[in-house]
Image: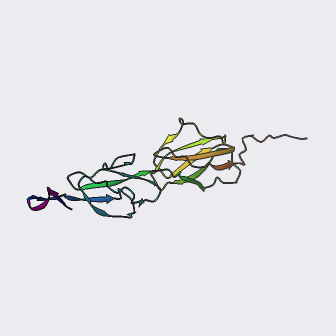
Amino acid sequence: ATIKTKLGAGDGAIALNSTVNSYTVTYNSNGGNSVSKESAKVDYGSKVDLTPTASRTGYTFKGWNTSSTATTALTTLTMGAANTTLYAVWADETAPTISVSSAPSTSWTSGNKSFEVTASDTGSGIAGYYISTSNTTPPTNGWEETTATTKTYTKGAGTYYIWAKDAVGNISSSTTVTVTNIDTTAPTISVSS
């Protein structure tokens, strides 16, 4: 942008022309699917537009930052004397889902039965499983840390509640598995005459 300034008045006035440099701001989705604005020209010393948005499956858009690893968004930014890239800031606020993918058999047995659960997460990925005979919210410790999306358990008779968590600590709702038809009582033989 050109700034025109006039010093003095009349025939002795001096006209000054100065140019303010413009630079490019690039909006980087930082792993996202899209941005509402890809770039803009901004004059040196002017405020940078932080209102464009971005989208990413499994994440909430928090805003923009000049660091690709930032966890908080800028609230204001003044254009400096160089091109700038703004990176989308994301927060994984979506809990994983979990379901029983292979139920325990219903036939009688004298030992434990196996079943399998499957978990999925559209954000940061599966980070662990928790199993309990109580349906209360799992504690922060006692989780089996694994990134596997399937987990096999072998358990005796009872009702089990299983949760999955993702890499940032979001916890799924529980899924329930009931193991039945386990007979641990040996048969008795009686002889009658």
Left or right? Give the position of 80 relative to 155: left
Name the outermost residue toward the top: 141
Residue appearing at x 50%, y 50% in the figure: 93
Left or right? Give the position of 61 relative to 2: right
Left or right? Give the position of 37 relative to 20: right
Query: Depth check: 144 or 110 in front?
Result: 144
Q: Position of residue 30 (x, y in %)?
A: 35, 56
Query: Depth check: 171 or 54 in front?
Result: 54
Task: Find out whether residue 9 is within the magenta segment.
Answer: yes
Colour scheme: rainbow
* Number of marks present in the image shown: 0
Give, as a single range, the part of the protein colored magenta: 6-11
Quadrant of image for the N terminus: bottom left
On screen, 151 above or below 189?
below
Residue appearing at x 47%, y 56% in the figure: 58
Task: Find out whether residue 45 is within the magenta segment.
Answer: no
Quadrant of image for the C terminus: top right
Query: Depth check: 32 or 136 in front?
Result: 32
Name the outermost residue toward the front: 10
Residue appearing at x 86%, y 40% in the figure: 191
On screen, 148 above or below 55?
above
Left or right? Give the position of 123 relative to 42: right
Q: Position of residue 122 (x, y in %)?
A: 47, 56
Q: Position of residue 12 (x, y in %)?
A: 8, 58
Name the outermost residue toward the left: 12
Q: Position of residue 52 (x, y in %)?
A: 39, 60
Location of residue 142 by image quarter: top right
Residue appearing at x 40%, y 53% in the figure: 63
